[in-house]
Image (cartoon, rainbow, N blue to C red):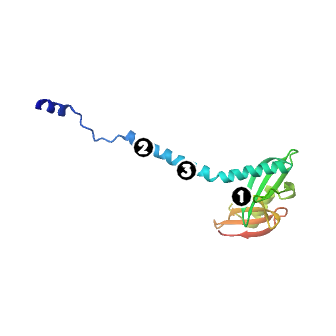
C-alpha cells in the first residue's frame, strides 16, 4: 500500500512555474476592450441631450420655415441658449434660422445679406492676425445677427470676436483666455 502512494506522487505532474503570456495578453486586451466600451458609452450618453436638441431644431426649422435641408446647427450659451441653423430652401437659397432656447419661434434671415465665409476670413485675418481660426458660427447678440469667431492669436492664447453679420464690425472681442 505504501508503494502505491509513492508511485502516485512520482507520476503526478508538477505545475510549471512558467508564465503563460497568452493569458496575460488576453486579460490585457479584455481590459482595454472593456475600458474603450465604457468610454464610448459615456460619450454617447453625455451627448444625447445635444442630439435631441439638434433633431428638435431641424424639425422646427423645416416645419416653420421654407428651409428644406438643414446643413449646420450651432448653439451658443451666454445668458440664454441660442440655436442657429443654416440651410437651403427648395429653390437653393441659403438661409439662417435663429431659435432662442426652448422657444418655438423661428426668425429667418437670408444668408446672402451677410458676409460670405471668405469675406469673413479676410476680415478676421486683417484685423486680428490669428495663427489659426477654430470656428465661425452665426448667432444673435443683443438682438443683432452676428458672427462668433474663435481663434488662436499670435501669443498662442484662445480669443473670441463677435462681429456684425453684414459689415464685420466688432461688437466685442475677448483676448487671451
Helix or strand or loop: what does disc 1 sit on?
strand
- Sequence-earlier tag: 1 or 2: 2
Q: CA distance from mark 3 to mark 1?
A: 26 Å
Q: Position of residue 72 (x, y in %)?
A: 75, 51
Q: CA distance from mark 3 to mark 2?
A: 18 Å
- Sequence-earlier tag: 3 or 2: 2
- Mark 2 Cα shell of 10 Å, populated few (<14), some (14-19), many (≥20): few
Q: Residue at x 20, y 31 (%)?
A: 11
Q: Residue at x 50, y 48 (%)?
A: 35
Q: CA distance from mark 1 to mark 2?
A: 42 Å
Query: Does the rendering let one see residue 153?
Result: no
Q: Residue at x 61, y 51 (%)?
A: 45
Residue located beneath label 2 in the image:
27
Residue 158 bears which disc, if any?
Answer: none
Helix or strand or loop: what does disc 3 sit on?
helix
- Sequence-earlier tag: 3 or 1: 3
Figure quadrant of the C terminus: bottom right
Residue located beneath label 3 in the image:
39
Q: Residue at x 22, y 33 (%)?
A: 12
Whether residue 86 sits left or right of residue 19 in the image: it is: right
Helix or strand or loop: what does disc 2 sit on?
helix
- Mark 1 Cα shell of 10 Å, populated few (<14), some (14-19), many (≥20): few
Q: Nearer the viewer, mark 3 or mark 1?
A: 3
Amino acid at each position: 500500500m505504501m508503494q502505491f502512494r509513492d508511485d502516485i506522487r512520482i507520476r503526478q505532474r508538477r505545475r510549471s512555474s512558467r508564465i503563460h503570456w497568452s493569458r496575460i495578453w488576453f486579460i490585457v486586451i479584455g481590459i482595454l476592450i472593456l475600458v474603450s466600451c465604457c468610454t464610448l458609452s459615456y460619450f454617447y450618453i453625455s451627448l444625447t441631450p445635444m442630439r435631441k436638441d439638434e433633431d428638435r431644431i431641424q424639425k422646427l426649422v423645416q416645419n416653420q420655415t421654407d428651409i428644406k435641408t438643414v446643413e449646420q446647427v450651432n448653439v451658443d450659451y451666454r445668458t440664454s441658449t441660442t440655436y442657429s441653423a443654416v440651410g437651403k430652401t427648395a429653390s437653393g437659397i441659403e438661409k439662417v434660422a435663429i431659435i432662442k432656447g426652448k422657444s418655438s419661434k423661428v426668425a429667418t434671415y437670408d444668408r446672402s445679406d451677410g458676409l460670405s465665409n471668405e469675406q469673413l476670413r479676410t476680415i478676421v485675418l486683417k484685423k486680428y492676425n490669428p495663427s489659426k481660426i477654430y470656428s465661425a458660427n452665426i448667432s444673435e447678440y443683443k438682438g443683432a445677427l452676428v458672427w462668433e469667431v474663435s481663434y488662436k492669436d499670435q501669443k498662442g492664447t484662445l480669443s473670441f470676436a463677435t462681429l456684425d453679420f453684414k459689415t464685420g464690425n466688432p461688437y466685442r472681442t475677448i483676448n487671451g483666455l
